Amino acid sequence: MDLKKLFKTMIERQASDMFLRANAVPRLRIHGGVKLAGDEVISLASMVKIADELLTLERRKKKYQEDLDIDFVHDEAGVGRFRINIFTQRGQPALVARHIHTEVQNFHDLHLPEDVLKRFCDEASGLVLVSGPAGSGKSTTIASMLSYINQTREKHIVTIEDPIEFLFQDQKSLINQRELGVDVLSYPAALKHVTQQSPDIIFIGAIRDVDTMRAAIGATELGAMVLTTFHTVNAVQAINRIINFFPPYLHDEVRMQLSIILKGIVSLRLLPLQNGEGRIPAWETMVVTPTIARLIREGKINEIQSFIDEGELFGMQSFKRSLVKLVKEGKVREEDAHRLADSPDDFTLELRGLKRFEK
């Protein structure tokens, strides 16, 4: 089983992910669906050989042996760049590869909310979150934001990633990219010293613990703009998750800090296009207005959704409205939008031009 050939097949079929496992046929994720890549079964010997081929660096091999799981980026000469996860299942190596597009697309080409993202990019300091489930386009959205800043502002950008996906060339901005396990040991370790590196914008690949969250909040309070991602499905869930990183006796303090530093949240979900030729994002945008800041401060987080629903004047849009627009524009099927809606019944009412009246 030739790894380079598999990567080429992945590119040719426009797959976002490839799945390899011993005693199974390779599969590709194409426009959201997982499809067979051929009919040849990968033997255990071939799977071990593929893993060994990718784990040539001693530090990678050691980490995989210790953790039975490893993430890194692999450049296949003449083919492309791939984010690799090698893990163990039933005592055998398995692999998922994601294709990383080397060219960073702009907001318009990605069908993202251009005006509100530019507004977030132009903030002098604060916290901006991009949320969504795995594979929803969070990294691509962050890359487009960093690219926009790089083209339009004279800033120092520091990224802390695990692993580094998109590579940037300095334009108006200076960009330093740090990778966990290569350039720094951990997110908290990187953030401990990052404020001494005079950053204007900090991108944190993921916030996984209270120490990283505390350091990110501290960086915004010292004047930096912090961009990061969350595996949450919407803005309200993202805010609750930040608060719940901390013990209950600190919740009032954290809500007060968030009400001051949080600038906005963009949440994403990908849907298959109606013509079957790709996917398109539905998006929810929350801009922290004085009213939303007050609701965060007072702990009335669940009331925020109604202000997102009615906040179009401030650049906000709910998932419900985004899904309705995509259906009415003929870009996605109604059944696909219905399946991804937070409240399928409310989505159907909105699509029919009706409103739900509470008793």
Image (spheres, helix red, strand yellow):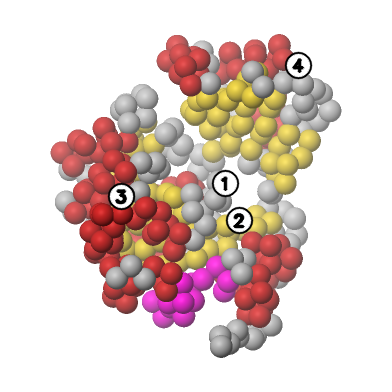
The residue to which callout 4 is attached is: 43
Q: Label 3, label 1: how many angstroms apart (C-alpha)? A: 30 Å
Question: Is 140 covered by the magenta stretch?
Answer: no
The residue to which callout 3 is attached is: 247
Three-letter amino acid code of the residue under disc 2 = Leu
Which dot, 3 or 1, sits closer to the camera?
3
Nearer-N-terminus badge (2/4): 4
Which quadrant is the N terminus positioned in? top right
Give me the residue at 60% from left, 23% from top: 88
Residues at discs 2 and 1 in contact (Cβ within 8 Å): yes
Whether residue 299 is situated above or below residue 158 in the rendered picture: below
Nearer-N-terminus badge (3/2): 3
Give me the residue at 84% from left, 28% from top: 39
Which dot, 3 or 2, sits closer to the camera?
3
Residues at discs 4 and 1 in contact (Cβ within 8 Å): no
Circle 1 crowding by C-alpha within 10 Å: few under 14, some 14–19, many from 20: some
Question: Is 313 covered by the magenta stretch?
Answer: yes
Which dot, 3 or 4, sits closer to the camera?
3
Give me the residue at 37% from left, 44% from top: 207
Nearer-N-terminus badge (3/4): 4
Secondary structure type for disc 3: loop
Which quadrant is the C terminus positioned in? bottom right
Three-letter amino acid code of the residue under disc 3 = Pro
Residue 197, x across and y down, in percent: 18, 38
> Which mark identifies residue 135?
1
The residue to which callout 2 is attached is: 270
Three-letter amino acid code of the residue under disc 1 = Gly
Q: Which residues are magenta?
A: 305-321
Whether residue 41 is situated above or below residue 195 in the rendered picture: above
